[in-house]
Amino acid sequence: MASIATAFRPTWTSVGRSIIANRSLALTGSTSGGFALSTPSFAAAQMARAQGLKRSTGAPAWLCSFQTSAFSTASGPVFAKRGRPGPDQGFAVNFVLQDGEEISVRAFEGESLLDVAWANDIDIEGACDASLACSTCHLILDEGSYNKLEEPTDEENDMLDLAFGLSDT
Amino acid sequence: MNRLILLRQLHRQTQRHFICPNGPVVALHRFKSVRAFSTSLVRPAAAPQTATSSGVDTEGTTLKEPPVDPAVAAVIRERAEKPFRMAVVGSGPGGFYTAHRILKHLPHSTVDMFEALPVPHGLVRFGVAPDHPEVKNVMTTFDEVAASPNFTFIGNTRVGTYTTPDSPKADLEISDLYPHYDAILLAYGAHEDRLLGVSREQDLKGVMAARTFVGFYNGLPSEQDLDLALSQTETAIVIGQGNVALDVARILLTPLEELKKTDLTDKMVKVLEKSRVKHVHVIGRRGPLEVAFTSKELREMLQLPDTSFYMDKSLLDSEMELAGKSLERPRKRLMGLLEKGAKESKPDQPKSWTLKFLRSPLGFHGDDQGTLKSIDLGINRLEGEAGSRRAVATGDKESLDCGLAFRSIGYKSVGIHGIPFDNRKGVVSNEEGKVIDADKNIVPGMYVSGWLKHGPIGVIASTMAGAYETAHTIMNDWNGGAPMLNDQAKEIASVTPTLATPEEKDISQRSNPLLDLLRARGHKTVSYQDWKKIEQKEFDLGATVGKPREKLLTVEEMLKVLD
C-alpha cells in the first residue's frame, strides 16, 4: 500500500504542517462513519448533508473530506467523549511540523484532520470553528490523493477562492 | 500583493530562554530567518533591521552571535526580568488576534485592551451580517484570549480623541497610557466612510452610507437614531459593488421571516415590516470583471426567492473575451456564476436586483420635502488592458428614479491626537505593523493592526494575518532590544503589574494602575466577565423571540445589566 503524502502548507495564519498518512490507513478502506453535529447551525447541517452525499468509495473515510474534513463541524465532541483511539484503534496520522518534528497521533475513522489536530494540541488555525466560513484550515494534497476524492462543493470552493496559497489540488 | 508576500515570513514562534555561560539571558526565536538585534537604540526606519547571517544552526534553535551593542544587550537583560506590558486600543479582530499571539508566544506578557463601547469585538459584532452567523465563530478564539489571566478587558473606556471636529469625548488620551506600558497597539479600525462628492449627497433624506445602515441593523449604539423609512419607495440603489453592497441588497430583499431568526435587531425588524422596497440596483463605475464582491455573497443573492436578477450579459461576454486566459481561478468562477445567474434567473418576479455597470453618480435630486427621488448617472466605457480596466466617461447620462441610496464605496479611518496618521491613504503609516511617522522614522513602542494598518478591505482572515504580522514585529522588537516606551525610565510612575498566579481567577481584583485611575474618577469600566453578563442578557432576550440574541441598543441598557 502506498502511503499517502499530503502536503499541508500554511495559509496566512496557520503554521506549516505536512501530513503524511501512515500506511495503516488503507486506501481502499470502508467508508462508514458518520459525522455527528456539534453545532446546531444551518451551515453545519448543510455540511453534514454535503458530506453524506460526498461519501465516496475507495477512499478512507478520514480522507473522505480532505477539504470538507477541514470544514467539518463535526466529530470533535463526539469523539472527545469516548476519548482518543488507543494504540491499536483507528488510524495513525503523522503530522510533520515545519521544523521537521514529527508528531504521531491516532485518529478515528470519520474524524476530520482539523479535529485530530485540535484534539492533540497541534496548532492549526481554524478561525471560523470549522463552519465553512473561512479558509484558514485549507489543505493542499498531492494529485493522486486529490483525485481519489470527490470535487469540493461550491461552498468550499467559494471559501478556497479567498485562500492564501491556493493550488490546483 | 506585497502584504501577502510579507506574510509568508510569518512562522510560528517558540521562544526559549537560554542562560548563556556569560550570564545574560538571551531570548531566542525559532525562525527560518532571524531578525537581528538593532545595533542602535535610536535608529531611523529607513534602515530596517537586517537578518543576522549565521546565527542559526541546523536545528534552528541556537543563536551563537551575541548582540553587538552592549547598550542593547543591557536592555535585553533588563527586559528578560520583567513582564512585557501592552495596551491595545480597540477590541475587534485586529486587536484580539495580535493580543492572542503575544500572550501565547511572549511569556510573562500582559495585555490591557481598551474599548470605547461596553461590548467588544468590533465589526465581528457590528459589521458581519446577521444572516452570516458562522463568520462570527471567531469570537470563540477571542473568548479564549480573554480567558487568559494576563488579559484585561477595559470596556466603556474611550482612548484617544479623533482629529475630526465632532469626536466623542475620550476617557483617556494616548499620552495617559505611556507611563504604564511598553507598547501600545492601535487597532481602532475605521468608523467613517468615504463620500462620493456629488450634489445633495449629504442633505437629502434617503441618501446614506452603507456603513450607517449596517451599523443600524447590527445594533451599533451610535447609529440607532437613523431615520430610516423603507416604506416610501420601491426602488433602492447601492453605489459600489463589494460585499458590503451585497449585504445591504440582501438585507433589503431577503424574506423577513428568515431575517427574524437572526440577531438582526428588533428595531430593524420593525422597519423591515413596513418596507416596500422591491427593486435594488447595485451600481458600479466599471464592468463585471472589476466587481469587488466574492462568490459566496453572489451565490446568496442568486438564491433569493421570488427575485429576478438582471445584468448586461453582453458586457460580461465581451469583457470575458478580452480577458481570455489571463483570468485567475477565483475570478473565473465568479464570472461563471454571474453568467449562470443571469441565464437561469426567472424574469418579472415580484422583486429584483440589478447589477448596473459603467455608471458613475453625478448628483442626487430630491422632492419638495427634501427626500431623494432620483439620481443622475454618467455612462462610462472601459479602456485599458484586461486586469487594469479604467472607467472613462462617455458624456452620456441617464436618470434613475429611486427613494433610497446607499453609498458603499469604502470605510475610512480617522487619526487620533498624539499619533501620526496618513490622511491621504487613511491609515496609520507602518512597516509590518510598526508605526512610522511622516518622515518615515520609527515611533518607538507604537504598533498598529487591522483596518487602521492596511486599509478597510479584506475579510477577517486577512485581518488576522496582518495582526499576526504585527505581533511578530512586536515580539522581535521586545526580544531584540529595540526601543519601546519606558526603556530609560527607572522610576516608572506605575506599578509593574503582578502576573496572575494560577489560583487567581478574578483579574478585576489585580492592581492595574489605569483601572485605579479610572475608578478614582468615578468612571465605570466594563470587564470581560461583565461583558459576558451583558451577552447572557442578550441571549436570554433572544430566546424569548426565537433569535440567537436580542442585541441591546444603547450604552445605558448595556451598563444597566451590570447594576
Image (tube, coloured by chain):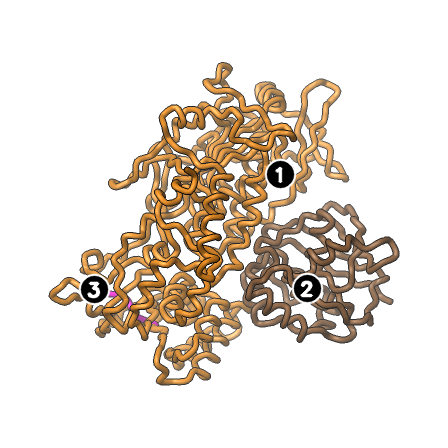
Chain colours: A brown, B orange
Q: Is residue A9 above or below residue B278?
A: above
Helix, strand or loop: magenta stretch: strand
Which residue matches tag 2?
A36
Residue B515 is left or right of residue A128, and the answer is left
Give the class, few, some or many, for how many residues have Cα within 10 Å of label 2's Cα (few <14, many ≥20): some
Residue type at mark 2 is: Ala
> Label for residue B363?
3
Q: Chain of mark 2?
A: A
Callout 2: SS = loop
**Residue B512 visible in the displayed image:** yes
- Residue A144 image position (x, y, % from top left): 75, 69
Residue drawn 63% across the image and 28% down it = B501
| Residue numbers of the magenta segment | B357-363
Residue drawn 59% across the image and 43% down it = B144
Residue drawn 15% across the image and 62% down it = B370
Q: Is residue B306 above or below residue B42?
A: below
Instruction: Work out how far the residue at label 2 is from the one at label 1, CA to CA, in angstroms.
Output: 31 Å
**In this rendering, which labeled residue sits more in front, label 2 or label 1?**
2
Instruction: Work out how far the residue at label 1 is from the one at label 3, CA to CA, in angstroms.
Output: 52 Å
- Residue B490 image position (x, y, % from top left): 51, 15
* Residue projecting furthest to the top: B491
Callout 3: SS = strand
Callout 1: SS = helix
Label pair 3/2, CB-CB below 8 angstroms: no
Residue type at mark 1 is: Lys
In the rendered image, residues at marks 2 and 1 fall on the same chain: no
Sequence order check, earlier mark of 1 and 3: 1
> Label for residue B104?
1
